Amino acid sequence: MRTWNTPDHRIADAEHGTLVFEGDVELVLADWQVTEDAPDADGRVYASIRGWLANSGGSGRVRDPYTQPVEDGRARLLRTELRGLKSVTGQDVHLSYHAVGRPYPNTWDHPGYLTTVSWMVRRIDEHGYEIPETEIGRTTWTHPDTGRVFDLTETFIEPGECYYDDPARPGMVWRHYDRWSGGVPLLHRFHGDEKTPTDNHGRRLTDCEWVEAAHAPKFSATFDRTA
């Protein structure tokens, strides 16, 4: 990808590619690149398609539905149309948008939304041989020491915290985002109902006595902290 932190960054003459998602919704990326991460501690290799969003509009806010042709978070990728690369088809992916700062006055020919689509491509052992993946996509997990069964589609908070149920001032919560470590699900921090985590630093479900938000004390505009 071209260096973006310049006053005259432009994508009109860059290579464009199309990603088609469930519902035949298209995401057009310019100046795209495809990368693979090094294997994680469990041998999982993740790939990413990254580029500048070229078919956006609306207000310019990242969560404006016109800015996002496809909603961020988990998504179903039907196929890719990237010149010179074999199409990725029928893949569950994670999609995120990042708005980068533009110069003033703005001379860019695009709104500056760096878009990343990522997924796990394979899992390998210590010798590099591929091994089956049985954890990605699971929706429940049983704690080996306590026998507690966790619903991985739930929202969690840390023990002793309140759950913010006021949409006007959402709090931080924890959710599973299809990442694992040593056979244990990782939870990532999310701001309210947002679909993508605030960072990539997950915590294991064995780190503390996580509480499902549905069963936690609520905090809202009418919540009495002294009660």
Image: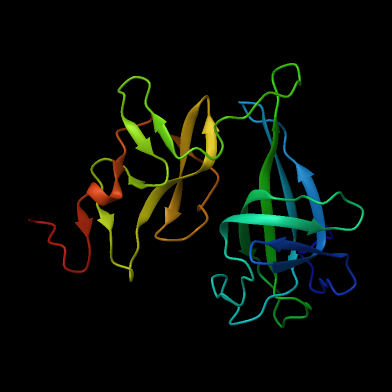
Name the spot of residue 14 as percent of width and height, x first: 88, 67
Name the spot of residue 96 as percent of width and height, x first: 61, 58
Quadrant position of the C terminus in the picture: bottom left
Observer-nearest of 210 and 69:
69
Identify the colour scheme used: rainbow
Query: In terms of image quadrants, where is residue 20?
Result: bottom right
- The answer to whether 227 appears left or right of 165 in the picture is left
On screen, residue 175 above or below 41: below
Quadrant position of the N terminus in the picture: bottom right
Query: In terms of image quadrants, where is residue 65?
Result: bottom right
Observer-nearest of 147 and 9:
147
- The answer to whether 1 appears left or right of 40 in the picture is right
Q: Residue at x 70, y 25 (%)?
A: 124
- The answer to whether 179 appears left or right of 46 in the picture is left
Q: Residue at x 71, y 75 (%)?
A: 103
On screen, residue 30 above or below 198: below
Observer-nearest of 8 and 16:
16
Q: Residue furthest top?
A: 127
Name the spot of residue 110 as percent of width and height, x first: 75, 76
Total label count?
A: 0
Query: In terms of image quadrants, where is residue 3?
Result: bottom right
Q: Residue at x 61, y 26 (%)?
A: 42
On screen, residue 107 above or below 162: below
Name the spot of residue 64 as percent of width and height, x first: 55, 75
